């Protein structure tokens, strides 16, 4: 920012971002977020209710936009902030306490976005879910869907790994993934389960219409019932030198394949 240039004020409670979208609610308490990208995105998200920001002077100055005059800010040093977050978490001088994002239903996002849908079957590592949200944002996915009881809660770890994408990619939590896959079939989505136990590559399995990509937990893969609800199974053409990819890496490659099909 040039010297003397005034930052634009953040809109709303602490900022409103046009088109901001929330994720499914995983808890009823407050959520603590940290790191510049995660905090800044949350402050700009109109679906967030913010409680308080703890910040160093440098951390607040690094934000893109100015907080409203009445926004509750408590200034703290780096050591104090480190006590408020996960051990060794890179808070970058910013910790935000806010309410969880509101619930969303899959039908809401399918009506407004033609991108692929990612179905995560018992992917529980918050770093992986955050990284998948980041890739989903990069490649224009319509939503990430998880089963409510077998996925990490909304948290600072997820938000930091997502680097802001938690606020922009709908994270839909459902009771039953199989029923969700049935709903996607009714909406004419071609459901592709990613697995190493097949001969068809993802490129060969991709259709021209809407796609739902189904990924299972590392090691165990998709459950049998979820696999049975897929229209096709496909693998990524990786070298025999490695057994499998991290699920977040596999999601990014699969999303890229969808984004570039037909080129």
Image (cartoon, rainbow, N blue to C red):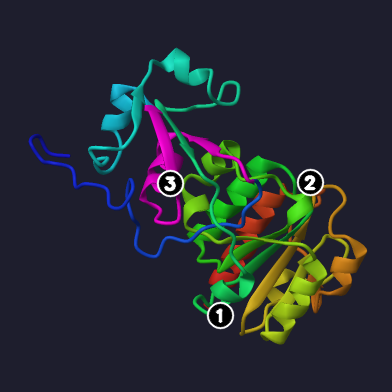
The quarter in which the N terminus is drawn is top left
Q: Earlier in the sequence, mark 3 or mark 2?
A: 3
Q: Is residue 51 magenta?
A: yes
For this rendering, which residue is in front, 191 or 29? Answer: 29
Report the number of numbered marks. 3
The answer to whether 105 appears left or right of 247 in the picture is: left
Q: Secondary structure at mark 1?
A: loop
Residue visible at 73% across and 79% down in the picture = 183
Please state the horizontal and vertical placement of residue 154, each as a whole percent of the image: 61, 45
- Residue positioned 46% across, 15% down in the render: 80
Q: Horizontal placement of 163 versus 106: left or right?
A: left
Of circles 3 and 2, which is in front? Answer: 3
Q: Is residue 239 in sight in this rendering?
A: no
Q: What is the quadrant of residue 227 in the picture? A: bottom right
Horizontal and vertical percent for residue 107? 61, 76
| Alpha carbon distance from label 2 to label 1 | 28 Å
* Vertical arrangement, residue 107 with respect to residue 194, above or below: below
Kindly give the residue lying farthest to the right in the view shown: 224
Q: Which residue is mark 1?
A: 262
Helix, strand or loop at disc 3?
Answer: helix
Q: CA distance from mark 3 to mark 2?
A: 38 Å
Seen at 33% across and 45% down, the residue is: 14
* Real-space Cα separation, disc 3 to disc 1, in angstroms: 36 Å
Q: What residue sits right under mark 2 in the picture?
A: 242
Q: Foreground: 245 or 176?
A: 176
Residue 170 lies, in percent from the top left, at 55, 61
N-terminal-most mark, 2 or 1: 2
Q: Magenta span covers which residues?
A: 28-54
Residue 42 circle label: 3
- Judged by depth in the image, the label closer to the viewer, 3 or 1, is 3
């Amino acid at each position: 920012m040039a010297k003397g240039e005034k930052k634009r004020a953040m809109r709303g409670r602490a900022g409103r971002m046009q088109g901001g979208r929330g994720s499914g609610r995983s808890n009823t308490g407050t959520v603590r977020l940290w790191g510049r990208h995660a905090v800044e995105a949350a402050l700009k998200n109109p679906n967030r209710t913010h409680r308080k920001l703890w910040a160093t002077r440098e951390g607040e100055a690094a934000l893109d936009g100015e907080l409203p005059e009445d926004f509750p800010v408590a200034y703290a040093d780096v050591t104090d902030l480190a006590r408020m977050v996960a051990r060794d978490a890179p808070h970058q001088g910013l910790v935000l306490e806010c309410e969880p994002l509101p619930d969303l239903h899959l039908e809401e996002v399918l009506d407004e976005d033609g991108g692929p849908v990612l179905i995560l079957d018992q992917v529980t590592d918050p770093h992986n879910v955050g990284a998948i949200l980041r890739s989903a944002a990069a490649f224009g996915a319509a939503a990430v869907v998880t089963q409510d009881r077998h996925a990490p809660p909304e948290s600072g770890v997820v938000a930091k790994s997502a680097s802001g994408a938690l606020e922009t990619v709908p994270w839909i939590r459902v009771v039953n993934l199989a029923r969700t896959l049935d709903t996607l079939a009714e909406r004419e989505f071609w459901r592709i389960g990613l697995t190493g136990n097949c001969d068809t590559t993802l490129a060969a399995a991709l259709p021209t219409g809407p796609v739902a990509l189904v990924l299972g937990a590392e090691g165990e893969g998709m459950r049998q019932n979820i696999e049975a609800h897929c229209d096709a199974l496909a693998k990524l053409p990786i070298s025999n030198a490695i057994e499998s990819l991290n699920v977040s890496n596999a999601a990014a490659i699969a999303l890229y394949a969808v984004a570039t099909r037909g080129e």
